[in-house]
Amino acid sequence: MLRALISPHIAPGTFRDRLRRLHQGGYLHQQRYAAPTGGLWLYSVGRTSLRPGERRPWRPGLTQVEHTLDVANSIVTLTRPGFALPVEVTGWQGEAEIRSWAPPGSPFPDARIHWRRDATIGSWPIEVDRATESRTAWRRKLIRYLTAQNSDPILALTTSEARATGLAHVASEVGVPLLATTLRACQDTLDPHVLDTRTRRRLPLSQT
């Protein structure tokens, strides 16, 4: 996953060797994580990368790690070649980059995917939902988008079609444009169907 996000053109063996060397040199801290789909290595800043007297950075709990992994999976899925043609995905931003440039009071999606179709450019603010938040919490999150400067629809990736339908209903009540589908649907096809709150129809993503 890490290679796919930052160095997709480097051979897997070469990438693993570089991570191993950074870990051995103390630049990266390496931790084993037992994920539902198998074991993963998680990396964070190592002691050699810290300034004298600087404390180790905070490390997230298990729930946040699982959400972060789903967000990374989503970015890899949505930026793969041929996704949502004739829409062309041109780039992406993670939450940290979005926060660094956003004005005060702006919503902070989990990621943002930039795209182009003919002469039109746009983006999808990505919200990755693990079905752990209540309807009220989702409503509060969506209300922040009412102050956003653009009207790009949110692309919400969740766990099931039933949950996607529920998120679409909340977005319609709030008045925020939203495209709801599942992460699995995006992984299984290059042009997944989404629930579009603007048309109240289920359409291929490329046609929204």
Image: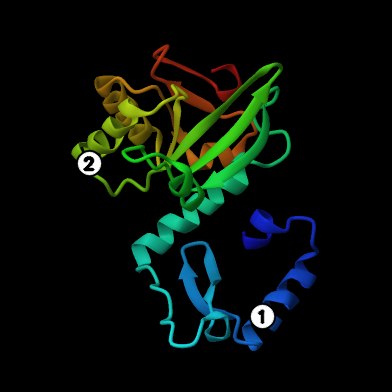
Query: Quadrant of residue 150 in the image?
Result: top left
Query: Residue beneath label 2, please?
Result: 137
Q: Quadrant of residue 105?
A: top left
Residue sitting at 53 percent across and 67 percent down? 38
Residue 180 image point, x, y percent: 43, 30
Give the spatial CA distance, label 1 vs label 2. 40 Å
Q: Is residue 149 left or right of residue 137?
A: right
**Which image quarter is the N terminus in?**
bottom right
Q: Is residue 48 above or below residue 177?
A: below
Other residues around mark 1 within 10 Å, as few (<14) / some (14–19) / many (≥20): some
Residue 185 at what x, y percent from top left? Answer: 53, 37
Residue 142: x percent and y percent? 30, 33
Q: Secondary structure at mark 1?
A: helix
Which amino acid, mark 1?
Answer: Leu
Q: Is residue 169 above or below residue 114?
A: above
The residue carrying pointer 2 sits among few (fewer than 14), some (14 to 19) or many (20 or more) residues within 10 Å by Cα, namely: few
Name the image quarter holding residue 135.
Answer: top left
Identify the residue at the far left of this view: 136
The three-letter amino acid code for the residue at tag 2 is: Ala
Figure check: 207 above or below 57: above
Look at 60% across and 40% down and name the residue there.
78
> Mark 1 or mark 2, which is nearer to you?
1
Q: Is residue 191 left or right of residue 125?
A: right
Residue located beneath label 1 in the image: 22
Q: Residue at x 73, y 38 (%)?
A: 81
Task: Find numbered disc 2 in the image and state the secondary structure of the residue it sits on.
Answer: helix
Give the residue at x 56% y 29%: 192
Mark 1 or mark 2: whose residue is earlier in sequence: 1
